[in-house]
Amino acid sequence: MTQLPVRTDRKLGLVIDLDTCVGCHACVISCKGWNTENYGAPLSDQDAYGADPSGTFLNRVHSFEIRPDEGAAQLVHFPKSCLHCEDAPCVTVCPTGASYKRREDGIVLVNEDHCIGCGLCAWACPYGARELDRAAGVMKKCTLCIDRIYNENLLEQDRVPACVRTCPAGARHFGDLGDPDSAVSQLVAERGGIDLMPEQGTRPVNKYLPPRPRDRIGADSPALTAVAETASGFLAWLDRTLDRLPGGGLARMDAPAKEENS
Amino acid sequence: MNPAPSVIIFTTLSGAGFGLLVWLGLGLPGVTGLTAFGFFAIAYLLAVGGLLASTFHLGRPERAIRAFTQWRTSWLSREGWTSVIALILMAGYGAGLVFLGTRWTALGLAGAAMSVAVVFTTSMIYAQLRTVPRWNMALTPVMFLTLSLTGGALLAGQMAAAKALLLLSGIVQIAYWKLGDRALAGSGTTLATATGLGAPRAVRAFEPPHTGTNYLLEEFVHVVGRRHALKLRAIALTLAVVLPLVLLMLGAGHLVAALAALCHLAGVAVSRWLFFAQAEHVVGFYYGKR
Ligand code: SF4
Ligand code: SF4
């Protein structure tokens, strides 16, 4: 049913830390790996080894550059998947009822057996979170790994979305954003988590933590104290003597250059 | 947005077909017997042909029947219902005219109202999308409805009405383009709101997530042909409005009317192509494109 629930019992979702993401795309791969062989139709590729490869992904990592008025530019890696919006426009436009939002946990899903592949839900999503699978002809989107998070056959620590489990930088967090006391809600409060495209009125559950300003070396920054001290005693004598031998100073200057060339 | 031929054919043909049904339902022209059969045949060919074409862009057309279930929220589902109801009502009304020579006025009026509703629901599929600011305007349904009624008037041989509607169509079309050109900027969505990385720091798309193309780029970030937009607008306006008007001024008769109608439909098809090709989806911001 494409009528949205008035409220959901929980709001499961992701918190993505743009300060921490290193842009390794591990979440993209683990997502594709898990989801191509679990919920619904496989995530197909077209011309995978040819000149013009393309394929279906549920999670993709963009990279943006911030150029501040002063100081160096900063690169921000930006993972993006379904934000499991509270006012999900993708659900209400669906003519078949294939798209729905679960009352119990707020996850937005596609029932692939009912989907006619009209593509309208992908048109309605501002974030590009839905992709029509070219082989199966049905709409694919992030399921929040519904087949992991409730899966009692998995170890406790594996009952999180594949992207969260795999992220080597700890940039992805999973939890109930409807519960103000949950770890993810606390994190959002503490770091000033934001909504993407709030003006679109989708009320996304997923939140993004903005990158923190980088430290800068300014006039008032404490100067570093030297670690190496000038040699004294026997070593100082040896150093001076070796320098005085023919070609001594030269050899020292040449050494690194020779190493580079070899 | 990708200007898929199936959708352009569908909206152009069924728009004209349901437009013709509106006029027939009003009893303009008040035909019966074989003449009525001819008019209804044309209307059904256009309307049903268009609807069939629209199923070509479905990934799983064999399940299309399911699209009737969600009329409470989905304009696409409502379009399915209105078109079936309109076609059934008009079939009954047409049968009365063709076989019995009787005009069931109330049935005709209901059929005409339903035919207007079909075009309106079609236009709302596009107009409801906040993600495509150029479509998300009150003028979108206005444009679909005026073009449909104009095409219908031309096909129904309602020359006086057609002339007035052609003029109106031209004005609405130009207004739609003018407002549409400002829609994306006016929507408030930018790369800054899309990423939250905006002001006072300048942000730009640095590296896309994938080196090849994907469904999103093919479907939503169609930029080919936009550079010819101005020329195509001139062509669309000439074909859809100016030439039919000139033809109608020059003479009457079936040949002139047929020529004017064909010319108009060709113009509407060009306008529809632009309607899709020029529409920018906000997801393009993430790719640094529009
Ligand atoms: S991110 Fe897109 S697909 Fe996901 S719930 Fe929101 S609108 Fe729907
Ligand atoms: S593509 Fe499938 S899920 Fe999306 S709107 Fe169409 S029928 Fe619904």
Image: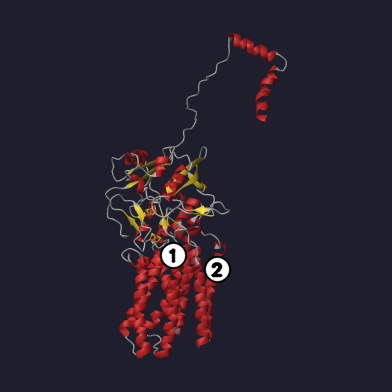
What amino acid type is highlighted by mark number 1?
A: Leu
Label 2 near ligand 2 (CB < 8 Å): no
Circle 1: element type: loop
Q: Specify the farthest residue to the right.
A: A246
Q: Position of residue A3 (x, y in %)?
A: 30, 59
Q: Position of residue A257 (x, y in %)?
A: 67, 27
The residue positioned 60% from the left and 9% from the top of the image is A234
Q: Between residues B139 and B130, which one lies in front from this camera angle?
A: B130
The residue carrying mark 1 is: B58
Question: Is the residue marked by circle 2 packed among few (<14), some (14-19), or many (20+) residues within 10 Å?
Answer: some
> In the rendered view, would you say A158 is above or below B8?
above
Circle 2: element type: helix
Q: Which quadrant would residue B123 be assigned to in this image? A: bottom left
Specify whether residue A12 is in view: yes
Image quadrant where one finds the N terminus of chain A: bottom left
The residue positioned 68% from the left and 24% from the top of the image is A254
- Label 2 or label 1, whichever lies nearer to me, is 1
Specify whether residue B147 is in view: no
The residue carrying mark 2 is: B232
Q: Position of residue A199 (x, y in %)?
A: 38, 53
Q: Position of residue A107 (x, y in %)?
A: 33, 51
